[in-house]
Image (cartoon, rainbow, N blue to C red):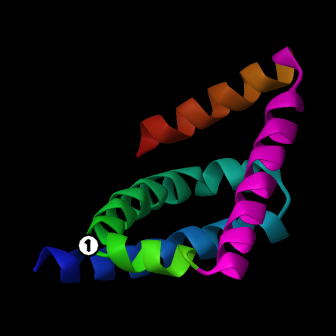
Amino acid sequence: MIRKIAAVSMAVSFLAVATSGMMMFVIEEPSFTIQMHPVHKLFGLLMVVAAVIHISFNYLALINHLKSKSISIYGGALVVCLVLLYGAAINNKVPADLAKQMDSAAAELDSRD
């Protein structure tokens, strides 16, 4: 039963995170990003929980996939891309006054929910 719940949770949360992320990507307005943030954040958290459950049930299959050299290289390249993008994002500081305004706006929107 848990496996089925995790699978459905992962599918729905993927749909929510993917569509909200794509909308934020296409509609490049900070106000829209802040507006979509609660959906993206909550379903992202659900997706993480569902993914952990899914991986725990399918750990051996994942290990078997990684035995393929080309798949391991592909996975390693994705991890390198992820680390580089996190590094670029962390080092791309938002000016303090603008960050404070954005944080206040996001907090106000979250308090309405």
Q: Secondary structure at mark 1?
A: helix
Q: Is residue 43 above or below residue 105?
A: below
Q: Position of residue 92 (x, y in %)?
A: 89, 32
Q: Position of residue 24 (x, y in %)?
A: 74, 63
Which residue is found at the position 59% from the left and 51% from the top? 37
Q: Is residue 9 among what the camera can see? A: yes
Q: Residue at x 55, y 68 (%)?
A: 17
Q: Where on the picture, by quarter, is residue 76?
A: bottom right
The residue pinned by badge 1 equals 57
Q: Position of residue 8 (x, y in %)?
A: 30, 82
Q: Is residue 85 magenta?
A: yes
For residue 70, above or below residue 97: below
Which residue is at the far left? 1
Q: Nearer the viewer, residue 109 or 23?
A: 23
Q: Main secondary structure of the magenta part?
A: helix
Quadrant of residue 29 within the rendered picture = bottom right
> With 10 as the anchor, is 107 left or right in this view?
right
Q: Which residues fall within the magenta stretch?
A: 68-96
